[in-house]
Amino acid sequence: MSLPLSQMTLLRPRSLDQALRLLGEEPTLRPLAGCTDVYVALQFGQPAAGRYLDLWGLDELRGVRRGRDGRLVLGALCTWTELQRSALVRRHLPMLAAAAREVGGPQVQNRGTLGGNVANGSPAGDGLPVLAAAEATVVLGSARGQRWLAFTEFYTGYRATQRRPDELILAFEVEPLEGRQWFRKVGTRAAQAISKVVMAAVRAPRPRLALGSVGPTVLRLPKTEAALAASAPMEECQRLLQEEIAPIDDVRSTAAYRRHVCSALLDRFWSETAPPRRGKQR
Amino acid sequence: MKFTLNGRRVEVEAHPLARLLDVLREECGLTGTKEGCGEGECGACTVLLDGRPVNACLVPFAHAEGARVSTVEGLKDRRLRAAFVDEGGAQCGFCTPGMLMAAAALPKGFDEQGLKRGLAGNLCRCTGYTAIYRAVEKSRARRAPARPKVRRAAPKRPARRRSA
Amino acid sequence: MPSVGKSVARKDGWAKVTGAARYVDDLRFPGLLHARTVRATIPCGEVAGVRVDAPGCVVVDHRDIPGRNVIAMIEADQPCLVEREVRHVAEPIVLLAHADRETLARARVEVEYRKREPLLDPRLSRQAFKEITIEKGRLAEGFARADLVVEGEYSTGAQEQLYLETNGVIAVPEDGGVTVYGSLQCPFYVKKSLEAVLGPGRRARVVQLETGGGFGGKEDYPSILACHAALLALKSGRPVKLVLDRAEDMLATTKRHPSIVRHRTGVTRDGRLTAVEVEVLMDAGAYVTLSPVVLSRGTIHATGPYRCDHVRVHGRAVMTNTPPNGAFRGFGAPQTQFAAEVHMDRIAEALGLDPVRLREINALRPGDRTATGQVLGRDASALLALREAVRRSDFHRKRKAYPSQGKGIGLALFFHGSGFTGGGETYLASRASLELTEKGARILVGSTEIGQGTRTMHAQIVADALGWPVERVTSATPDTALVPDSGPTVASRTCMVVGKLLERAALEMKARLGRLSPRAYLRRHGPLVVTKQYEPPAGLEWSDQTYRGDAYGAYGWGCDVVELEVDPATLETRLLKTTAVCDVGKAIHPVMVAGQIEGGTAQALGFGLLEEVVMRDGRMANAQLTNYMIPTSLDTPPLEAVILESPYPHGPSGAKGVGEMPMDGPAAAAANALRHLGFDVRSVPATPERLLACPRLPAPGAKSKARPPRATSARGRRRVS
């Protein structure tokens, strides 16, 4: 690859404040961190000339901690490796640890970040269904201050988000979740794979389902969830699910296969997370 | 920009957005690190950044500043190298530098799944990975390693005949 | 101490584990220019106009070709650079070079086209580049004897070689000609192409560098790159580097020929094949390239390793508007043997017969005649390979036990002709030389090391013939100015054919040396180079007109067993184990032979289950490593390689070759294992999407349809399709 380096500039702020100030002054700056998406896009011909803002060194955006009310705060720069290893994530958000294990290979896991996954906004992003099912809050920051947005409202369309040009994704907050969490990625192969379908779900008290790679962006399935909550028969839930997804044929899979897998995964989620000893809950 | 390259502190002038891969190969003259795809899929460009495997094709040079970068040229593990040679872990050799670096970063006491997961970011088209596993396991074994699982069965019916 | 049969240290091993090995992109030359190819963007049409805006760049188009505008291969139909007609999306039109890559990337070339409707479906193609018919006995007679006729159509997709190092060359103007350094398999092919393009009076020299994998993908394409780089070098007077990036490599270079194979087989109730009729269609792509010989190998192997008195195989390789398909490990045989082996399982099913039993009944044995009429030698070990694979894998027990565990097990039996087909080796008349050095001997061959172990294996053969330790034997760089033409490094011939030449050369050198040490000999008699040329073993006969005779000097025989399970919800296949038995005649270097079997098997499992080239409008739509899936460590099952040795009298120490053979069986074995699980798979790759769409068979154990046919007269025989 030959990058037009003479037409590329990297700004390297030393603190979050400085980064936000720079971005406030120049909202066209292109933020980068682990670069596992940015450099791939450049390799595939995305225009590279321009000015970039390096977030990689901003330690304020790293780490996982418990915030107020027991909520989990995930720094935007948490790498997939850190998320897999974090005891907090493994205990409170195991579906995220599961997702993190399935991203790329070790090299990508060491560099790719949760914030980058969300900012990139690919409908196949492995972390997205987890945040959607967990009903996470996105913490956005700018020189003007911070704001909190429901993750489920963050995307407005294919790779389009509510992030304003002068804002950075700082963190994700997840309230304590009740109920069993479930995650399954159906990828193009066993490792180093892109999702054909990726599903994250929480069982109780209110079932929540999120699916990736079956619509222009990550999808929550309110009708299916309501049917599950109302103990509707699985066939009915699957029928509703089919109405709520919009998969397409692409180079990785087919709409028909994605539809088949979504229904099958719904059934599997529901049976695998069924409460013990109460028989089949429907 | 200053960083530590294979244990030696160096200062290299390059664009902060240049790919670490290009800086290593072109500015530092270390061509052992290979480019197989440029999209972070094949792992041929794997180097260790502060001890962790990364794809050098997806790392801007800026992120090496002040860091420890290790490439195949600086690999200290002679046992690992020798095992790759003896067990057939290197055929065409193009994935080998990256594979060696990924193997060097494997945690102690990995099991079979850990080994496979640890190398899942490195594609090899020659070996089917089998010989690579043999090599890595051999290099980590305390005692003399088992010979490769090559089994031969001499035919019984068609008589064995040597050429004259 | 003899080294043949021992896994001595690889000659190229240490350089490859230290990063010292030099590949084409690692080389530097003063004044080097980087090159770029401007390719067509339409699959079919004509160039109406070209506008170049490339300040400071060296620009080359077809008018700059001093010689002939062809890539000289079997036919000279492929232009080096497009003049007017465009036949596929990756056709090169203009070449650019500049010292600065950024400037090069900024250069703009606009091409106007007059588009024509492309031909993309090989079934609709009327233009056959090659047509082959093999006939044995009388088909009608064979069918008349059948109790049952089983028919079926099978297809395989394109497959990308995906060597980890992309194609690349550097051309350096030298001595009124050009020297090309490159990642390539066949230096003398490249030389021949260069000579045609450069024209008379310009010297062409080709040097093979360390090559990061080939698998056939660097058999013919490097000729194109070399010509392009050479033209730029000639025009600029400077060294020019042309290394493809991954996407361009996938878009432009050759793939395995997609195939559609139809079988119609007559069989008796007790499982004997009475008539075999096979129709083979291969998609050649836009130019002839190697398609005639791929088709040739494909048709010869199309019956599978089975005896039958009445055979007709008809094959066609047809033109379409896609980049030319070409050589890929196995060279047509994996496609046709996939069909043959899935078909065999379907025959067994129709007869209610055990698939192993059916193969035992029909497997070719020593003394049998193949479809081309070749009488097999004593090394024909199909039965041995089959029984070894069945025993090692515990096939019979698992075949019964697996269905209740949600697992499947399947096998495939195959053979693979070593060396060039028919009279090919005689025509090539390969040569190999051995030079006496102060310390020992130096091998001079055009055969290339592309990972498979050429240097080491040749050194072992030579060392043993001379009675020396292997360390005393070295190899020269394959440089056309230095080494004789040993033929291309393809077709599993580098050991059997070139290795044998070296063995002969070494034996002669030994005789000449007598009791003298190399140093003493050199002092007394001066330099010594022994050259040997291929001579066909006595009695080999072949006719290209009738396709009858001895198609190959020898065959390797093999059997694969694949065990797998399928996630019932997602239809994802998880491979549990693969047992790969290969009879290689003699394993010169067991670790490297096992490496060929393991690597080839993994590649073939990719072919069978994962690897799909998605074509849209004649263009590969998934030309990224992110979207073209080769097996990772987690996709590859434990592989057990089993080496059998039934020696071939005319191979060095009995060796028959191994490179391609492991590619032939795994896809069918995997499909048959899926079949065992109830998936009626007749097309690969058997991706989850295909499994979803494919018909399901009655559950194993439900014998309703698998009952043997009732006694029927010849007229009232059953037909299964």
Image (cartoon, coloured by chain):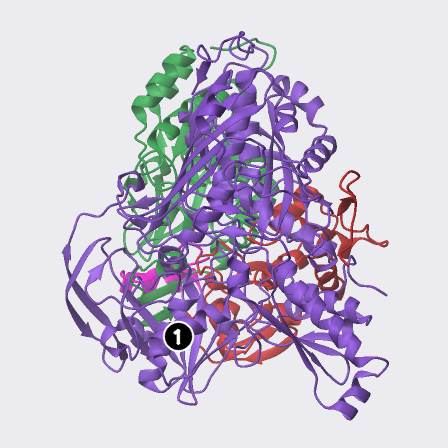
Chain colours: A green, B red, C purple
Amino acid, disc 1? Leu
The answer to whether residue A259 is visible is yes
Q: Which quadrant of the figure has residue C84?
A: bottom left
Which image quadrant for residue B155?
A: top right
Which chain's residue wears label 1?
A: C
Expressed as whole percent of the image width and height from the top left, the position of residue C557 reads 64, 42
- Asked if residue C194 is positioned above or below residue A56 in the image, the reply reads below
Toward the viewer: C80 or C464? C464
Return the residue at label 1.
C194
Left or right of C254: which side holds C427? right
Q: Residue at x 33, y 45 (%)?
A: C615
Identify the image quadrant of residue C326: bottom left
| Residue C677 in sight | no
Residue pictured at 58% horizontal, 40% vertical: A88
Query: Dividing the image into 4 quarters, which one contains the C terminus of chain C?
Result: top left
Residue in view at x 36 percent, y 42 percent: A251
Q: Residue A26 lies in magenta, yes or no?
A: yes
Task: Please name whichever residue, C404 or A242, is drawn nearer the observer in this view of the structure.
Answer: C404
